[in-house]
Structure formats: C-alpha cells, structure tokens
Amino acid sequence: MTQTIKANCSTDLSIRDKKSAFKTHSPEETQEIGVRIGSQLSPGDVVALIGDLGAGKTCLTQGIAQGVGVYQNQTVNSPSYILINEYEGKIPIYHIDLYRLERLEDIVALGLEDYLDGDGICVIEWADRMGELLPESHIRVIITVEDEFTRAVEVLPTALK
C-alpha cells in the first residue's frame, strides 16, 4: 500500500524492518521523508538512492541530513562534480554521487571502503552503479517520477545489521 505523505504528518516509516511506500507532491514533502529516514540512521548505515535525473535524490538527502542532525550552517547540495561531500553534525554524513562514473573500475578507484566502513553515514546517489560493491547491509530508496510534482518513494531495508 502506498501512502500519500503530507509535510509534518505522522505517517509510519520504519527503515529497519519493513518496506514503506509513499507519494510526495512537493520538494518539501520529499525532504520530510528524508528527515524521517535520517532520524533513524546510525553510524555505519548506508543509504542507496536510486532514481532518474531530477527525481529528487538530492532533495531527499537534504532531509536526511536534517534528520541526522547536520549542523545548520552547512549547505547540502549535489556532489556531482566533486563526487563526495562531507557534512559535519551529530554523526558525519558522506554524500556520494556516482552520476559521472559509468565504469565499475572508476568507482573502485574512488576508495569508498574508507567511507563505507567508517563512523559516519553514507548516502549514495546513483547507488545502482555500484553493483556488487554496494554493501549487503543498506537501506535502498527508490524514487520514481510520476509527473512534474509527484514522486513515488520506496524505502526498502536490505539485510540491515
């Protein structure tokens, strides 16, 4: 069952034990899903974001950062050109964007193990490009564009610790 999310409402979302599905109708509502995901994350968690260009992966990441407690003086934006942004807060967030990397060899060359095995939270845009490099234990978030304003968001726990 897909739930329609309204910003600031108490719709059930659990990242640890069950699949959750939502429809959002604005960037603010997509960020609200991110806040709810972020509030449940712990050091060592990996969030794998999957969706087309413009689906809202960075918008969701902005909410995750807020939910985790990233310091408010930091701007959360897409690391497409620099590949990895680091945000400080209660728990560090490593925001990784693999959009510009098409070959698995290029992803391996980034040395992501240090981030994936570190003490922070990894949020990876275009995570489907990692293939078998994606840790078995992760939270998969699939964002699908339905129309100009509507997004379908699925949150799928995958072999979490």
Image: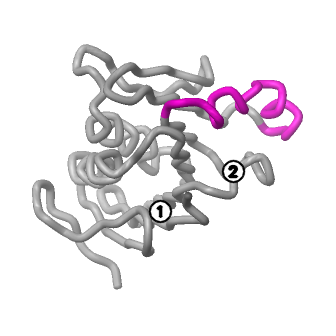
Q: Position of residue 152 (x, y in %)?
A: 39, 66
Image point (53%, 24%), residue name: 79
The answer to the question of whether label 2 and label 1 lie on touching residues, with beta carbons closer than 8 A, is no
* Marking on residue 144: 1
Q: Is residue 4 left or right of residue 115?
A: left
Q: Is residue 40 left or right of residue 97?
A: left
Q: Position of residue 143 (x, y in %)?
A: 46, 59
Secondary structure beneath dot 1 equals strand
Q: Nearer the viewer, residue 117 or 23?
A: 117
Q: Position of residue 53 (x, y in %)?
A: 54, 45
Q: How many marks?
A: 2
Q: Residues within 10 Å of mark 2 (few under 14, many from 20)?
A: some
Eyeballing the image, is 145 above or below 1?
above
Q: Reading the chain from its start, which is encountered first: label 2 or label 1?
A: 2
Disc 2 marks a residue whose amino acid type is Pro
First to last magenta residue range: 102-120
Return the residue found at the far top. 73
Task: Give the labeled residue for mark 2.
Answer: 135
Q: Is residue 6 left or right of residue 143?
A: left
Q: Position of residue 120 (x, y in %)?
A: 49, 31
- In the rendered structure, does residue 46 fall within the stretch colored magenta? no
Quarter of the image holding residue 151?
A: bottom left
Image point (45%, 51%), residue name: 55
Split into 4 quadrants, where in the image is the N terminus?
Answer: bottom left
* Marking on residue 13: none
Disc 1 marks a residue whose amino acid type is Thr
Q: Nearer the viewer, residue 116 or 55?
A: 116
Image point (33%, 48%), residue name: 34
